[in-house]
Image: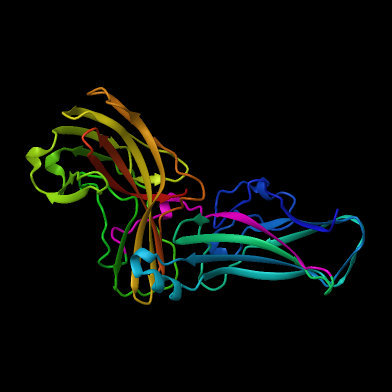
Amino acid sequence: MGTSLDIKIKRANKVYHAGDLNLPPDQEAGTGMQTGHQHLQTGVQEVLSGVVVISGKDSIQHQGVSLTVEGSVNLQLSAKSVGVFEAFYNSVKPIQIISSTIEMVKPGKFPSGKTEIPFEFPLHVKGNKVLYETYHGVFVNIQYTLRCDMRRSLLAKDLTKTCEFIVHSAQRASNFVMENEPKFSSLPRAGPEARTPLGPQPRTHSAVTTAEPPPGQLRPQKGKLTPSPVDFTITPETLQNVKEFIFCAAGVPPRVILSEQRALLPKFLIRGHLNSTNCVITQPLTGELVVESSEAAIKSIELQLVRVETCGCAEGYARDATEIQNIQIADGDVCRSLSVPIYMVFPRLFTCPTLETTNFKVEFEVNIVVLLHADHLITENFPLKLCRV
């Protein structure tokens, strides 16, 4: 057995709360420092605590052991939005949220066997920056890591161990006041009344605008959690436009042409509602859907969760929508006038409270997708506002 280096965080779930007012005090029992239930504005943050474990069958000579806490926002420009070469050369510089290093042990020697070195790290931020919630996206990635480095002599390789911990930006609902419109000008936004045309739709969408960024510093979006039920009705008349498939000879891909001849479409009537589009991220999205009538047989009904990420660059803002998850809520030609429940749990790490800053935005949408046997795809889009309380 060689020399090994490991980091063990005291909390099993590795979740820490930024500005949480209601954190049970026993969650930080045994740290010997302030707990995380103080208000964010007091400057007292939660304490990240644990032990560094160094194991070896022989004594270990070293040149010092250091521990680093880092938190950053990594932005990636989409090649679809700004081009392949522009995305490669115009990489956006990571936004540093938190960075702190402490020297745990000075140069010396560890005895054989296992050595545990306890540590405590207050999660302080610099200036007016805030601890955004951990989020793993495609073009926006918010991550917090704990890295331990043990420097050794030239004849021995340095040891490094990295461990990720999770930050939740808990807020009171009374302090969550949602702004009605985005700060980014000219960005397309789909609403409850927007209709996606018939025909197969791409899973990703991109748009670019050269609007100037709004003034101000990095800040999280504030919102107020108020129930916002949405009723919807889908018929051929409510569609914005229609895409009709023209199938060609074998070996030739089908062509898609725009058509306004709605009379050629199969008649259908789909009703339903979502209980709220302002959602608590720890609670499911619920509602129901009813197929009142449909001339064409139904193949499938799906619920698609989409992330909409906007990143700033020198040329403007790149907006990209990508799928997070797709859940089938009905299979086959469902019975008419039968209520089909809508139920979706927001996945951990891949979703976060709706976030709007000077440099980037993270928003979420849900699509209700109805696939017909006549090779038509009906999509209804709903923007969502997520928060954590």
- Looking at the image, the residue that sits furthest to the front is 250
List x then y, in percent, for residue 85.
40, 73
Residue at point 75%, 60% (across, down): 119
Q: For this rendering, which residue is in front, 356 or 381?
A: 381
Question: In the displayed structure, would residue 132 be above or below residue 368?
Answer: below
Q: Is residue 181 magenta?
A: yes
Say which residue appears at 46% left-offset and 56% top-offset: 137
Q: Residue at x 58, y 54 (%)?
A: 166
Q: Is residue 159 magenta?
A: yes
Q: In this view, does 318 lie above or below 303?
A: below
Picture coordinates of residue 75, whole percent (x, y): 46, 66
Residue 361, located in which quarter of the rendered image?
A: bottom left
Would residue 303 be visible to someone looking at this image? yes
* Quadrant in which residue 70 is drawn: bottom right
Magenta segment, which residues?
156-182
The answer to whether residue 288 is visible is no
- x and y percent of residue 370 in the render? 27, 37
Q: In this view, does 9 lie to the left or right of 153?
A: left
Colour pattern of the rendering: rainbow
Please state if 317 lies on the left or on the right of 125 as rendered: left
Q: Position of residue 168 (x, y in %)?
A: 54, 53
Q: In which quarter of the image is residue 86?
A: bottom left
Closest to the observer: 362 or 377? 377
Residue 200 drawn above or below residue 92 = above
Horizontal side of 255 relative to 94 (left or right) equals: left
Total count of labels: 0
